Image: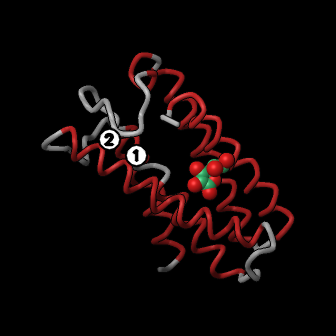
């Protein structure tokens, strides 16, 4: 993918979401649950691959890390539309709906952190990647502690 397209692909969902455009609708609550779980699952796969590099368990390949970080950054914009009213359940705790402002803030924090990770990954600076990876992981954990079933 060309960088221009990648940038567009990264920004477009956010722009559409902020415009209030419902770009994905779900026929049944289970479809929303499946959608958000699938998105998080692919995010975790790419994030985990970067983690293996950061932890020294896999060799550093700049292109691979950059691709995985771009995937994480792009996907980070998607799950939120699938936490709409009436989609309670799955691995989500009731707080997602009862304390929605806090959940939204946690999601926004994560999106910012993985955007920073993507910036670091595109630069190829291993120290910056390591730092940004740790910060991003902390936002995953922070939200899981409050909003995900154990
Ligand atoms: C991962 C993953 C998460 C986060 C979290 C960080 O690789 O799947 O949910 O990192 O464990 O603490």
Q: Residue at x 40, y 49 (%)?
A: 78
- Which residue is identified by label 1? 79
Label 1 residue SS:
helix
Which residue is outermost to the top?
A: 98
Q: Residue at x 74, y 47 (%)?
A: 135
Label 2 residue SS:
helix
Q: Name the spot of residue 109 as percent of width and height, x first.
A: 62, 38
Which residue is outermost to the front?
A: 150
Query: Marks 2 and 1, Cα distance to the nearest angstrom?
Result: 5 Å
> Do the residues bearing badges 2 and 1 touch, measured as CB atoms within 8 Å?
yes
Is label 2 within 8 A of ligand 1 (CB to nearest ligand atom)? Answer: no
**In this rendering, position of residue 31 left or right of residue 118:** left
Q: Name the spot of residue 43 as percent of width and height, x first.
A: 51, 59
- Which residue is identified by label 2? 82
**Camera-side residue: 100 or 5?**
100
**Camera-side residue: 120 or 36?**
36
Label number found at residue 136: none
Which residue is outermost to the right?
A: 127
Using a 10 Å C-alpha cutoff, classify the residue at mark 2 as few (fewer than 14 neighbours), some (14 to 19) or many (20 or more): many
């Amino acid at each position: 993918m060309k960088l221009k397209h990648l940038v567009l692909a990264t920004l477009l969902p956010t722009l559409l979401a902020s415009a209030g455009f419902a770009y994905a609708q779900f026929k049944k609550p289970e479809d929303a649950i499946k959608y958000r779980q699938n998105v998080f699952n692919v995010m975790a796969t790419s994030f985990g691959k970067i983690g293996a590099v950061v932890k020294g368990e896999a060799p550093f390949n700049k292109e691979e890390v950059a691709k995985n970080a771009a995937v994480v950054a792009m996907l980070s914009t998607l799950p939120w539309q699938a936490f709409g009213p009436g989609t309670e359940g799955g691995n989500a705790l009731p707080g997602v709906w009862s304390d929605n402002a806090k959940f939204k803030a946690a999601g926004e924090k994560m999106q910012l952190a993985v955007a920073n990770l993507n910036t670091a990954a595109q630069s190829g600076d291993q120290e910056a990647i390591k730092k940004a990876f740790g910060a991003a992981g902390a936002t995953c954990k922070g939200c899981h502690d409050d909003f995900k079933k154990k």
